[in-house]
Image: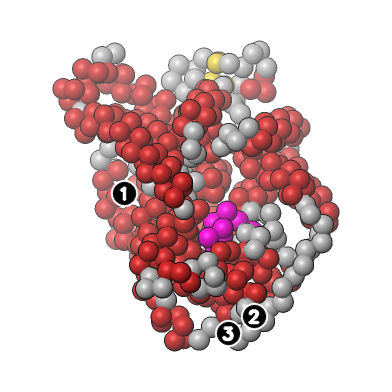
Amino acid sequence: MIEQFIEGFGMAMRLDTMVMMSIGLFAGMLVGSLPGFTTLMAMAILLPISFFLDPLVGIPFLLGIYKGGIFGGSVPAILLSMPGTGAAVATSRDGYKLTQKGKSRKALDMALFSSVFGDTCSDIFTIMMIFPIAFLVMQFGPPELFAVLLMSLIIIAATSGANPLKSLIMMALGLWLSFIGTDPLGGSERFTFGLFELKSGIPLLPMLIGLFALPEVASVVIRNDGARKLSALVGERLKFAEFRRCFKTICRSTVIGTMVGIVPGLGQIVAAMMGYSAAKNASDHPETFGEGEIEGVAAAEAANNAVNGPTMVPLLTLGIPGDNVTAILLGAFVAQGLRPGPQLFEEQGATVFAILVAMVIANLLFLVIGYLSVPFFSKLVTVKTSILIPLVIMFAFAGTYVYRSDPVDLLMLVAFGIFGIIAKAGRFDVMPLVMGFILGPSMEYAFGQTMAMSGGNAMGFFVTERFGALGVLIAAPIIGFMLWRRLYGAARTI
């Protein structure tokens, strides 16, 4: 693995990779700067572009969108008190107050520097952690893989919302959708209802764009309140002494975001709220938080960006997406012929390490592009949605059709889009559905292999020969329940 890392380091130093990462960073910041337009939407709409690029160009391009979009959401949060992404909700508490005090430039500088620091540290941690975790995962057999995948689904269902029943319903639906098509073990058709188009299963791209992009478009249309009053980008730049005063808080939030990122299903919003709360509780002057305390901006932005790197650990080693955005990344990996999981490091180890190294390099580009472009992005917050919505819809349909040139994909896009809008109106989180759909085939295949190994007596096999897998199966519902109680309790107190 050390040799693969060295080879991957050299592979990452490509000019076309740097260029596409820069384009991705700029695109992510641009979309994140538009109120109501989320990183998730940008990833879903621009995902098809990566399919036509080399893996070492296409994947870093999406990672650039991911990183840039999370920071971009802080621009409208600070200038308008309208978070561009859910992760920027905590940022808006003090960011907009600073804008009202004529310190908007200082707030945006702190958001940028905190974001880059948190992201860089978490990426380095990811590279360090990937070695032992990948080595451990490569020792897994089908029973252990099945147990871990099942535990991941339970954790995702428990942490996706306050109502675990709704999450379980959506996850069950996602698992059922993953069964449509041909049985990977027996070769028989299932749930195709006699339709030839369903024999190969439901394609992932129309589902992702339909569930994530179209409901976001509908939300933007519903929330549109006409012209927005822009607070000018004013005030002096951030001073080093101010950054140094907040450095302890930034480090604390970086650790919190990194730990949150490792657990599938939590994501940036939880990290930002936890980082902000921890900073407020540790402060000698907690009464200033929410009144224009620049430390609050630093805490939130360092935490939500520190999530980005560690979400790649379960994604690459087990094929388990940590959140909605990494679910889209998983789709890109699969489309590129890189199926995340235990075998990935054996078959494509150098490519994986090249992508991880590119993540670290992206942060340097992130700092330069963000520093130079903040004045431009700050003017985008007043762009009319009536101009942007048709463009987003056009990209959604064009990207869906271009990938396979199959008109049926457009029908699936519309169907999943309508379903996503209805689910959002009913407060059903679609993340468990997507996770169930993505992880379903791998879990089914691992279960089939386990049954073959056990001779049909899986329970006896686990009890007598696979103690590790049995322990994971027993711990899964307990961990899921404890996480749900803690997160639900924290949500009520924040």
Q: Is residue 443 above or below residue 288?
A: above
* Residue that badge 1 annotates: 134
- Which residue does the image show at 48% across and 68% down from the upper left? 289
Question: Spatial distance from mark 3 to mark 2, Cα to Cα?
Answer: 11 Å
Q: Is residue 333 above or below residue 1?
A: above
Q: Secondary structure at mark 3?
A: loop
Residue bounds of the magenta highlight? 84-91
Residue 263 placed where, x, y %? 38, 47
Which comes before the other along the chain, label 1 or label 3? 1
Residue 476 placed where, x, y %? 32, 33
Q: Nearer the viewer, mark 3 or mark 2?
A: 2
How busy is the neighbourhood of tag 2: few (under 14 within 10 Å), some, or many (20 plus)? some
- 90 within the magenta span: yes
- 283 within the magenta span: no
Q: Secondary structure at mark 2?
A: loop
- Residue 435 appearing in the image: no
Which comes before the other along the chain, label 1 or label 2? 2
Which residue is farthest front?
A: 287
* Residue that badge 3 annotates: 237
* Residue that badge 2 annotates: 102
Dominant secondary-structure state across the stretch colored magenta: helix
Q: Are marks 1 and 2 in contact (CB under 8 Å)?
A: no
Q: Quadrant of the N terminus?
A: bottom left
Question: Spatial distance from mark 1 to mark 3, Cα to Cα?
Answer: 43 Å
Residue 273 placed where, x, y %? 47, 56
- Which residue does the image show at 46% across and 32% down from the upper left? 164
Hey, what amino acid is under mark 2?
Gly
- Which residue does the image show at 60% across and 71% down from the upper left? 97
Front residue (pair 68, 157): 157
Hey, what amino acid is under mark 1?
Ala
Q: Secondary structure at mark 1?
A: helix
